[in-house]
Image (cartoon, grey):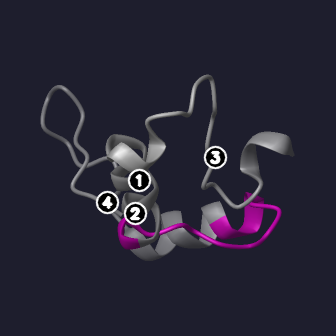
Amino acid sequence: MTGLRTVDGRQVYADPDEITATVRAFNPLGVMPRAEQVAPLYRFLASPVAAGMTGEVLRPDGGLTVR
């Protein structure tokens, strides 16, 4: 959950508990990935360890995109 806002400044997630429940209900694994769970994947991709990777897509979304 972040402080995401629309162009006119309104909060996208006015009620964090409500959006979390909605995402969990819709998500096949029943999870709402948190920033601290997703950030290490991006750190890995930006690191020298991932230098040999090409064309990979990491989807830390609890199965949402394959639903």
**Residue that mark 1 sits on:** 44
**Residue that mark 3 sits on:** 59
Front-most of 28 and 51?
A: 51
Question: Picture coordinates of residue 62 (x, y %)?
Answer: 70, 61
Q: Which mark is residue 3?
A: none
Which badge, 3 or 4, comes first in the chain's sequence?
4
Q: Residues within 10 Å of mark 4 (few under 14, many from 20)?
A: few
**Residue that mark 4 sits on:** 14
Tell whether label 2 touches label 1 (CB within 8 Å): yes
Q: How far apart are the alpha carbons under marks 2 and 3?
A: 13 Å
Residue 2 sits in quarter: bottom left
Query: Residue placed farthest to the right in the image?
Result: 67
Tell whether label 3 touches label 1 (CB within 8 Å): no
Give the SS element for disc 1. Answer: helix
Viewer-side label of 1, 3: 1
Q: How far apart are the alpha carbons under marks 4 and 1?
A: 32 Å
Q: How far apart are the alpha carbons under marks 1 and 3?
A: 14 Å
Question: Picture coordinates of residue 33 (x, y %)?
Answer: 53, 67
Question: Picture coordinates of residue 59 (x, y %)?
Answer: 63, 46
Residue occupying image coordinates x 79% and y 70%: 29
Amino acid type at circle 2 is: Pro
**Residue that mark 2 sits on:** 40
Which badge, 2 or 3, comes first in the chain's sequence?
2
Viewer-side label of 4, 1: 1
Viewer-side label of 2, 3: 2
Where does the magenta region start and end?
A: 24-36
Residue occupying image coordinates x 65% and y 72%: 31
Give the SS element for disc 3. Answer: loop
Amino acid type at circle 1 is: Phe
- Determine if the magenta segment contains residue 31: yes
Q: Residues within 10 Å of mark 2 (few under 14, many from 20)?
A: few
Give the SS element for disc 4. Answer: loop
